[in-house]
Image (spheres, rainbow, N blue to C red):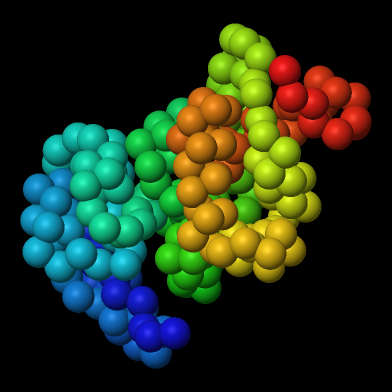
């Protein structure tokens, strides 16, 4: 696997310089651009199409709209929020906008690198210790959506959900079911629609709710 291209956006010059240095001195990454505003983030994404965009939430412009635009209009760019905002509402809003990671600025350098690697691999990463607070907030919102009506899953969708609940990655699910990884991604898109989820984490939370409703029995179709 080649190096992960990253673009970094933060309106604090010293913080930005430190993060740029962190990624530039790690052989797994290549820094392709940097900026200080929401508009910079959009410009960098349109021009460079980085694998991962790391951006602060507290800077000029509507960052949440920027996250959504980057995720929906780019060809695979992932977004990781790197911020001092410790409210679960900010994290939920960022994840719902399409962010693949939410990392607090008090985290270690390795946690930031790990979070970007995870996002690049299609996973969701939240700062350990803060994750429980975010998951509980997402769980509450997801349960309300699932409770709104019955969920109909195909046999293959049920199989994928069970493997997701066991912590399997898309690649592991593909191998386990004997299907292509691209097919798994297509099913994930369908599951997000059916479970009213905006990301992989919300799919897991909604799937857990389905299992609870069935008292541990296999997820039933309606």
Indicate whether 109 appears above or below 103.
below
Q: Total marks drawn?
A: 0
Residue 217 in picture, x, y percent from top left: 90, 30
The part of the image, by quadrant, that contains residue 143 is top right
Which residue sits at x=33%, y=64%?
52
Which residue sits at x=62%, y=54%?
128
Can residue 112 be spotted in the picture? no
Residue 55 in picture, x, y percent from top left: 29, 54
Specify whether 140 is left or right of 176.
left
Residue 165 in picture, x, y percent from top left: 74, 46
Indicate whether 16 appears above or below 147.
below
Front-most of residues 26 and 210 = 210
Specify whether 122 is left or right of 161.
left
The single residue placed furthest to the top in the displayed view is: 148
Check the picture and name the quadrant holding the C terminus.
top right
Specify whether 215 is left or right of 177.
right
Which residue sits at x=74%, y=24%?
221
Front-most of residues 184 and 96 = 184
Which residue sits at x=38%, y=42%?
98
Check the picture and name the quadrant holding the N terminus.
bottom left
Front-most of residues 50 and 219 = 219
Can residue 154 be spotted in the picture? yes
């Amino acid at each position: 696997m080649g190096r992960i291209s990253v673009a970094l956006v933060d309106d604090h010059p010293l913080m930005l310089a430190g993060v740029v240095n962190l990624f530039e001195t790690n052989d797994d990454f290549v820094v392709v651009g940097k900026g200080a505003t929401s508009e910079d983030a959009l410009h960098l994404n349109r021009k460079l199409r980085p694998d991962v965009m790391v951006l602060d939430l507290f800077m000029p412009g509507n960052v949440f709209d920027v996250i959504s635009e980057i995720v929906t209009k780019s060809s695979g760019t992932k977004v990781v929020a790197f911020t001092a905002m410790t409210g679960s509402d900010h994290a939920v809003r960022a994840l719902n906008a399409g962010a693949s990671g939410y990392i607090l600025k008090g985290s270690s350098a390795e946690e930031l690198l790990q979070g970007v690697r995870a996002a690049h691999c299609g996973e969701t990463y939240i700062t350990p210790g803060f994750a429980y607070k975010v998951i509980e907030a997402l769980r509450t919102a997801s349960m309300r959506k699932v409770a709104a009506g019955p969920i109909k899953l195909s046999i293959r969708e049920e199989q994928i959900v069970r493997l997701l609940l066991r912590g399997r990655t898309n690649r592991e699910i593909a191998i386990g079911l004997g299907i292509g990884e691209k097919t798994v991604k297509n099913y994930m898109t369908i599951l997000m629609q059916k479970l009213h989820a905006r990301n992989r984490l919300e799919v897991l939370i909604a799937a857990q709710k389905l299992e609870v409703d069935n008292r541990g029995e296999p997820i039933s179709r309606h």
